Image (spheres, rainbow, N blue to C red):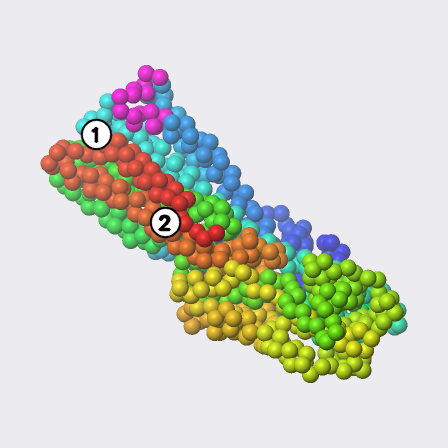
Amino acid sequence: MTKDPICGMAVNEQNSLRSEKDGKTYFFCSQKCQDKFLHKSRPSGDRVDTGIYTCPMHPEIEQDTPGDCPKCGMHLELKNVAGADENDNRETRSLFHRFWIGLTLTLPVFILALGEMIPGFDLRTVIPSGFSRWVQFILATPVVFWSGSIFFVKAWRSILHKSPNMFTLIAMGVGAAYGFSALAVLFPGIFPASLKQAGEIGLYFEAATVITVLVLLGQLLEARARTRTGQAIKALLGLAAKGAHRISDGKEEEVAIEEVQKGDMLRVRPGEKVPLDGIIIEGKSTVDESMISGEPLPVTKKEGDRVIGATVNQTGTFVMRTEKVGSETLLSQIVDMVAQAQRSRAPIQTLADKVSGYFVPAVLACAVVAFIVWFVFGPRPALAYALVSAISVLIIACPCALGLATPISVMVGVGRGAQSGILIKNAEAIEKCEKVTHLLTDKTGTLTAGKPHVKTVITADGWIEPALLNVAASLEQSSEHPLARAVVAHAKEKGAELDPIDDFQSVTGGGVKGALNGKAVFLGKQKFIESSGIGLPEELKKKAVQLQEKAETVIWVAVAERIAGILSVADPIKETTPGAIDALHKMGLKIVMVTGDNQKTARAIAEELGITEVYAGLEPKDKQDIVKKLKREGAFVMAAGDGINDAPALAEAEVGVAMGTGTDVAIESAGITLVKGDLTGIVNALTLSRAVMRNIRQNLFFAFIYNALGIPVAAGILYPFLGLLLNPMIAGAAMSFSSVSVIGNALRLRTVKLSG
């Protein structure tokens, strides 16, 4: 056993990180410790490779340092889970500072420029024009070249790789607006007098700064959403046991979980987490495996049965032989599945990128044509007119509202969803929700309430219901089993009085027994009652079978060696589920049930709800595999669930939906959370998604249309007829109209009608 050279933690060599240094091999418990060691052991200034970074949208792009994708401009993500949060946090902090500093400097530029555009208001009576122009120049320079520098880098890479996108268009417009304005301030004499108004060339500093700040806002919102997805990994890692009781040479010792190796014998006591995956070799117990199966009922475990790390031991003590450690354990595999699925999900591919791919070359072509025409046929000085016309085309072609078109609709849509209990993590979930064709839903906690409930009480001859409930609840009050709690809760609702029980005993996997008022009482499964020498009436046995066919668990109660009656416990379907399923069918979705429960129970629930496709007895990886299979077949999958076992499927699906009543891991793995845990929320989410995406397309139209109409004017098409060239008022009006149209249109989302 070795130790991490940085933190001193014991390291299992088979499952640790390692590095070579001076001919020696060092082992590390985490990426962070490895990085610290490499930084310390290398000369100052040397670059340290901390992993491979890849683009979620273009996985073929890989490099050993953080950065942006040269094709789409998206932030590269670390393949290795360790360290990813730190890198994402750095990006978010950087964008945060760029945005707020840029916004602070942009506000005075915007106010100064606005004053010049208001008809009938002469700003020069308040602030001298020359002073105002220099202030705008000084304030706009850091906004464009510091706050907006990342856009120029992204744009340059897109040009090198011949993949024009939104950043290409943004950089082109911002650069042209700033460059033209800077020339007008620094060298006003190079412009012909015919291009000036009131002796001055119009400035576009406010356009350059406002566009920069709006696009930074969109990038900041996206970065924050991406950072939050890492919380699912943290939640999963927090489930693991921190220590174990290892038995060696007849002695028991406390050891850290990292020191346990394959073949080690571990003792697990009641209430403790199972340390790692293994096999029981001594003892028996019941284990809460709801994190894996999603089912609330504990599972009986005996010698030879498999136990899973991080599940919770309940009633008995057992000794297990460790079979899997480190990355081999099921919990580690779930962590890896969630990480890979989240990384593989492409960031939102807005229509802006697609439109930009055509708009950029079209604008450049217009600018070139305008330059040539003015240079050949325009008045003298021809070069000055040609340059001004070409630059004017680039300026007015940049849609000021482009950076606002998607974020404003998303923000209004997210707010509308929150009012109806739909928490949407990011714009990606909204975009993909619109395209969903298949809904994969868990059973327990999603379709059903997730809490056992007494559904039927049948008494034997000579017994009445209150007396039967009194006996059953009195006996069950000493048990911690979920079914026992259901029986006690039901009895109290009916007003039953509970009596004390003597000689209480719990028989693992069978039931409980004791003495009530001097009489022997038994409660549990049919086999348990029969093994106690008590005969069962045939009529009750037939009724028990009928209840089991309805996915209900039957509990037998006997007093003084005679049957008193039976109770059935079931996980009831939520009242809103049937209506929601019907609405989803009408929306054209194919619904598939995926559950860790047994086939018989799953089929009974599915038939009642009209679900035809059912997969039962599944483990977390099985659910994820079904999502992958459907995606390969061309389906666009939404997955809904509430448990840890659902997390890989939620992350793998194009859209993951978590019940707000479920686990933190499921919520963090999902793109959408339903606060009320109500399936009707999915209907509302789909309705809202379609409305938001329709609104975004309308906004993109408004963002481009005014500018597109202004391009011919900027190119000088009206000059031969009207003597009209590009006027700063025209550009300012186009940008203002597009922004107002976008904002006004987005606000209409507040009136979208949702159920509930």
Q: How far is the residue under mark 2 from the one under mark 1?
A: 37 Å
Q: Mark 1 points at which residue?
A: 195
Position of 232 with respect to 217 (left or right) is: right
The answer to whether residue 69 is magenta is no
Residue 225 placed where, x, y %?
A: 51, 50
Residue 89 as seen in the image, left or right of residue 415: right
Residue 719, visible in the rendered structure: yes
**Residue on which disc 2 sits:** 696
Residue at screen point 23% across, 27% down: 196
Relative to residue 235, is residue 337 depicted above or below? Answer: below
Residue range of the region highlighted in magenta in the rendering: 112-126
Q: Which of 701 and 181 is in front in this view?
A: 701
Q: Which of marks 2 and 1 is nearer the N terminus?
A: 1
In this rendering, position of residue 204 left or right of residue 665:
left
When the figure is inspected, residue 409 is found, relative to residue 288, above or below; the finding is above
Task: Say which quarter of the image contains residue 447.
Answer: bottom right
Q: Quadrant of residue 15?
A: bottom right
Q: From the image, give the main secondary structure of the stretch colored magenta.
A: helix
Q: Which residue shows up at 66% across the image and 77% down it? A: 544
Residue 424 circle label: none
